[in-house]
Amino acid sequence: MTTLDRLARPGIHETRILEQFGERALWRGRNPMFNHPLYLLAFVNRSGSNLLAEYLRTAPPFAGFHEHLNHDTVARLAVQLGATSFPDYLRLLGETFGSPGRIFGYKASWDQAAMLFRFGIHRMYRGVRVIHILRNDTLGQAISFHIAAATRQWTSAQEATVSTNVTFHGPGISELIDSIHFGNQAIEELAHLFNTPRLRLLYEELVNDPKAVITRIGRFSGHDLSTWKPVQPSIRRQASELNDDLRAAYRAYAVKVFDGA
C-alpha cells in the first residue's frame, strides 16, 4: 500500500469524530472564518513535539498546540464547550483557551492532518502552515516510543502506570522505525498534495539551540521572533541507561537479521 493509499483511509480520530458529528464535522462555508493561516505542529510520536509546543506557547503570536484533535478529547470538550459542529469546536477552542491577538495552533499526527483537509477545515483559514518536527535518530525515537508504550509515561510530567520491566522486542522496534519513517513521509506528501508550506525542524537542533529554531519559525510565519528567549521547559529528557541497553540489543538483533541468522 502506498503512502497516498494510506492517507486516503480515515484514521481512528477521523472515524470517531465523524461518528460524533456526522456531516457537521465538515466546513461548508464559502469564506474563511479566520484571517490567518491554520498552523499545524505535525509530528510522529516521540519526536519532541511536546517540547516545541511548550516553546511555541511562549512565543507571540502563538497559543494552543495541544492535542485537541484526539477523538476522546474532542468528544469531551465539545460537550463542555457546547460545540454544535467540529468547525464550531475549533472556533470555541481558540476563544476559550487562546489569548487575544494570538494564533491558536494544533498538534497533528499525519492522520489528523489528513482529517482536517478531508473535512475542509483548511478552508476556514487563510492558508495552512505546517511546522514539521522530526528526529535524526529514528532508532532512538523508536526505543523511546517502545519504553513509553510499555510504561504509559509519555512525558516526564507523568508517572509510570505500568511497573513491569521493559523487555526488548526486536521485531516490534523494527516496526516502530518503519512507522516513524512512514509518518514523516505522509506529512511531507500531504503538504505537497495541498501545496502547503512546510518547515522541517529537527529535535536535535531544538535541544541544542531553541532560540535559533523559534527564530526560524518566526521567519516562516512572517513574525520577528528574534528577541524571544527560551524559558525552562516543564518537561525534561527521559532517556536513561535503559535506552542505551535497548539500542545495543537492537543493533545486535538487526545485524543477525541482516546476516540471515
Image (tube, rainbow, N blue to C red):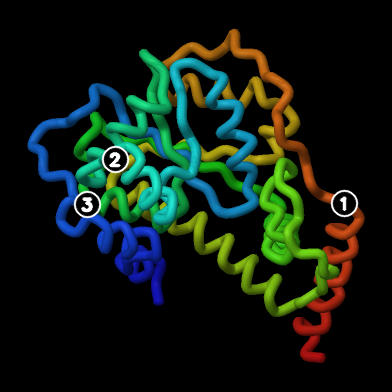
Q: Amino acid at mark 2?
A: Tyr
Q: Secondary structure at mark 3?
A: helix
Q: Is residue 202 left or right of residue 182?
A: right
Q: Where is residue 237 shown, x and y percent of the image?
A: 78, 42
Quadrant including the C terminus: bottom right
Do labels 2 and 1 touch, CB within 8 Å?
no
Q: Where is residue 27 shown, x and y percent of the image?
A: 17, 44
Q: Is residue 123 left or right of residue 150?
A: left
Q: In this view of the protein, which residue sits in the foreground, 80 or 207?
A: 80
Separation of residues labelled 2 and 1 (CA atoms) = 40 Å
Separation of residues labelled 1 and 3 (CA atoms) = 43 Å
Q: Say whether residue 103 is visible.
A: yes
What residue is disc 3 on? 25
Q: Is residue 215 left or right of residue 166?
A: left
Q: Amino acid at mark 3?
A: Ala
Q: Residue 68 bears which disc, if any?
A: none
Using a 10 Å C-alpha cutoff, classify the residue at mark 2 as few (fewer than 14 neighbours), some (14 to 19) or many (20 or more): many
Residue situated furthest left in the rendering: 30
Q: Secondary structure at mark 1?
A: loop
Quadrant including the N terminus: bottom left
What residue is disc 1 on? 240
Residue plotted at (80% across, 85% down): 259
Using a 10 Å C-alpha cutoff, classify the residue at mark 3 as few (fewer than 14 neighbours), some (14 to 19) or many (20 or more): many
Q: Amino acid at mark 1?
A: Ser
For marks 1 and 3 on the same chain, the one whose residue lies earlier in the sequence: 3
What residue is disc 2 on? 89
Residue plotted at (61% across, 40% down): 50
Q: Where is residue 158 shown, x and y percent of the image?
A: 71, 46
**Is the residue 207 above or below the residue 158 in the image?**
above
**Is the residue 195 above or below the residue 56 in the image?**
below
